[in-house]
Amino acid sequence: MSSKIVVLGATGYTGALIVEALVRRGEQPLLAGRDAGKLSALSERHADLPTQTVDATDAADVTRLLEPGDVLITTVGPFERLGWAAAEAAVDAGAHYIDTTGEVGFVRELQRRHDERARAAGIAMLPAFGYDYVPGMLAGALALERAGVAATAVRIGYFATGSMRDGISRGTRATMAEGMLLPTVVRRDGRLREVRTGSRTQPFQVRGDERTGILVSGTEALFLPVHYPGVQTVEDYNGWFSGMARVMPVASRVLGAVAAIPGGRPLIERLTSADDDASPGPDEQERARTRSHVVAVAADQNDATVAEVHLEGPSAYSLTAELMAKAAESLLDGRVNAAGVTGPLQAYGLSGLESLCCDVGLAELPR
């Protein structure tokens, strides 16, 4: 029996986009989720794809969907609360694994729990393989390659061209809200450190305008130094809402203080939780109006810029769907040599990652 792709969380906003991207590539994924009615409706839109109801938080239930050599795509998050069962199931079944997480704490723990077993089984686990954080990995690597040994730091900014006011899904809102209460992982002085999310801001040039990003976590801090050991500082910044960046260092301190008070964290979670009555995410027209723009700036020990790379591509959601579909295809076809919990550079190499990104519409802007 030939190996298959399983999409866990297929009926969610991002999951449905991934299914569309896979079908456009000629794949016939198994659609998995908890709601049989929604699965049936999604299947009918795509010429009756196979479906299976499953409890995504039950590792044994997910394992029964998988065979050795399969590819499991999971979108079920927030991952630090809901993502462990899928990862465990993939390792238990000997299936490759890809997820959409933006939670770096989850990725670090995934390495601790499953890297050794995944390597032994010869399977690849590719966490955060979407807009979070493949574009930054590519931009950062290109900037560091061009900077050479002079580079000791790289700072990566994630931006969007066009308004993001109506361009964020419910799932992203929930993850962003939880993320404000979690520490940000950065690399400073050659070591991973946990600092307050939003505690710093950084200006970047985006299509001739200065935009400001707030400090956030990124897997670049985990994976780039594996390939560029001379880099002492790796930081990520999000500039989707540059107008709010000025107040974020103060706001993050206030949120931290409130969260430390008994009952403070649940209060913040209620106030920032996603609205269930809101649209699940931007429609096709809205996505077409918003493009991704990612900047990587490599600097020397005096913090002088020595290389700068700009990438632009489809909207965050369209880009994530296409990246996940492309990665799943390559895993299914045995075109990924790396095993274990790994980053995109290790999985594909720089030229391979650049080719993969170009194939899904993410390309470098001329300088």
Image (tube, rainbow, N blue to C red):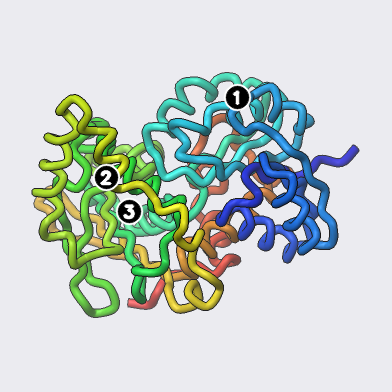
Give the mark nearer the N terminus: 2 vs 1: 1
Whether residue 122 is visible: yes
Label 1 CA crowd tier, 10 Å (few <14, some 14–19, many 20+): many
Residue at mark 2: 234
Label 3 CA crowd tier, 10 Å (few <14, some 14–19, many 20+): many
Q: CA distance from mark 2 to mark 3?
A: 11 Å
Residue farthest right in this picture:
1
Give the number of the mark in front: 2 or 3: 2
**Quick check: 134 above or below 124?**
below
On screen, residue 327 versus residue 234, left or right, reads right
Are the residues flagged by discs 1 and 3 in contact, CB closer than 8 Å? Answer: no
Residue at mark 3: 144
Identify the residue shown where x is 39% and y is 51%: 274
Q: CA distance from mark 1 to mark 3?
A: 34 Å
Whether residue 333 is visible: no
Disc 2 residue type (three-letter)? Val
Residue at mark 1: 88
On screen, residue 306 versus residue 333, left or right, reads left
Secondary structure beneath dot 3 equals helix
Secondary structure beneath dot 1 equals helix
Identify the residue shown where x is 58% and y is 65%: 360
Identify the residue shown where x is 47% and y is 36%: 79
Disc 3 residue type (three-letter)? Leu
Secondary structure beneath dot 2 equals strand
